[in-house]
Image: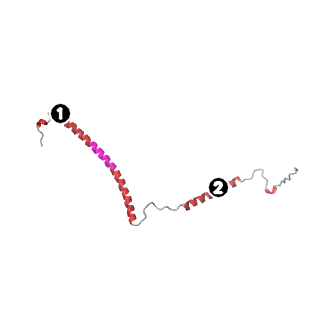
Amino acid sequence: MRAPETLLPDLPLAATKERADEVQADVRAALEDAVERSTELTAELTADLAAVLDEARVRGGAAWDALRGERVGPPVARRRWPVALAAALAGATAGVAVAVALRRLRAGDPPDAQEPEELLAVVDRGDGS
């Protein structure tokens, strides 16, 4: 369908050329923005997709292991009480050894101590003598 020429505005040719340049610049700016946003979105989606694929790989591997009858889940915990008991015993032994060594170092006789052969017993009879 063609519009009658009487309905078209009478604009000078120079005005339409300037307007066309403005519209073209606006379109280029919009396209550049769209390219930048699409690049950013693509980077975000790529990161998200990598995380999703990694999760799917882990879950798929677990499902495959379950189908084969293998154990699925966290690793089985080891018993740690023998190691804890050995560490406690080693600590107690070291503590006793330090206590004995300190006692021997401090157990020196005072300077005015008598020899055991020279000790005299003093008897207190309570009568004042």
Sequence-first disc among 1 and 2: 1
Of 90 and 3, nearer the camera is 3
Write down the residue under mark 2: 98
Amino acid of disc 1: Ala
Q: Main secondary structure of the magenta part?
A: helix
- Magenta span of residues: 32-44
Left or right placement of residue 76 versus residue 50 in this view = right
Using the numbered discs, state the Cα–Cα distance from disc 1 to disc 2 in whole angstroms. Answer: 102 Å
Which residue position holds label 1? 15
Residue at the (28%, 42%) spot, across then down: 33
Which percent across, then down, holds residue 24? Answer: 21, 39
**What's the residue at 29%, 46% (across, down)?**
38
Q: Residue 82 at what x, y percent from top left?
A: 55, 62
- The residue located at (28%, 45%) in the rendering is 35
Q: Residue at x 70, y 52 (%)?
A: 106
Percent x, y for residue 87? 58, 59
Residue 43 within the magenta-colored segment of the rendering? yes
Q: Quadrant of residue 117?
A: bottom right
Which quarter of the rendering shows the N terminus? Answer: top left
Between 114 and 19, the one lying in front of the other is 19
| Apparent side of residue 85 relative to residue 13 in the rendered image (left or right) | right
Three-letter amino acid code of the residue under disc 2: Val
Mark 1 in CB contact with mark 2 (< 8 angstroms): no
Q: Crowding at label 2, few (<14), some or many (≥20) Cα neighbours within 10 Å?
A: few
Figure label count: 2
Q: Residue furthest bottom?
A: 69
Q: How is the image coloured?
A: secondary structure
Is 127 included in the stretch rendered in magenta?
no
Q: Secondary structure at mark 1?
A: helix
